[in-house]
Image (cartoon, grey):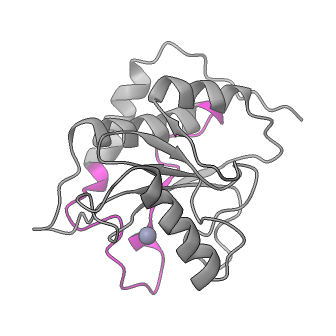
Amino acid sequence: MPRPFHELNGEAFRERLGNFGWTRRIWRVDMHHTWYPTQSDYCGCDTIDKMYRFHVEDRGWDDIAQHISIAPDGALWTGRDWNMTPASVGGGLNKGVFMFETIGNFDEGCEVLEGAQLASVILVIAEVQEYFALPPEALLFHREIPLTDKTCPGTSIDKGRILQMVRSYRDNSPRDKSPHLTS
Ligand SMILES: [Zn+2]
């Protein structure tokens, strides 16, 4: 979804996922933290616009890297067109990926992923996976790729705990499990 960026709640995100004219199939969800901006730097749409400008003007990318940015208050900000490959982990590994950035620095001793923001992280992972009939394990942390010294999405984020929360969200979801591709 090109600029201007829009703020969605969980329900609106779920609806957009279902109504979106998908032309590609997603097979993995990639989780990142922004590191900078931090949670305390966040000031609404301005923060998303700044990331956009950094990615496009400084990095030379076509658009903001991520499909969704998750704010400290749990708001979900639209980003790159969902049918476009994101600028996620590099190395030719981005095809078929739905990528989100969690706004904050979640390295140990810095900021904490909790509350509404954590709930939105789980919702995004679970809803995208469910829509495309993927298992909870179809989730990549940036730090898991080979030959990286990144800690992203932060050393305080335990993947086992995230997977457990995604499973429990999906176990309690009333939605059917079939993919609904438009083509
Ligand atoms: Zn990352």
Direction left: furthest residue: 109
Vertically, is 70 above or below 54?
A: above
Vertically, is 44 above or below 149?
A: above
State which region is magenta: 131-160
Q: Is residue 111 left or right of residue 150?
A: left
The image quarter containing residue 132 is top right
Q: Which of the four quarters of the rendered structure image does ligand 1 lie in?
A: bottom left
**How far from the left and from the top, in percent, is residue 72?**
29, 47
**How far from the left and from the top, in percent, is residue 18?**
68, 26
Residue at screen point 28% across, 66% down? 154
Chief SS of the magenta region: loop
Q: Is residue 71 left or right of residue 61?
A: left
Given residues 62 and 91, the one toward you in this image is 62
Residue at screen point 62% across, 69% down? 87
**How far from the left and from the top, in percent, is residue 77?**
50, 46
The image quarter containing residue 62 is bottom right
Residue at screen point 39% across, 72% down? 143
Residue 31 visible? The answer is no
Residue at screen point 28% across, 50% down? 160
Image quarter in which the C terminus is found? top right
Direction top: furthest residue: 174
Vertically, is 49 above or below 171?
A: below
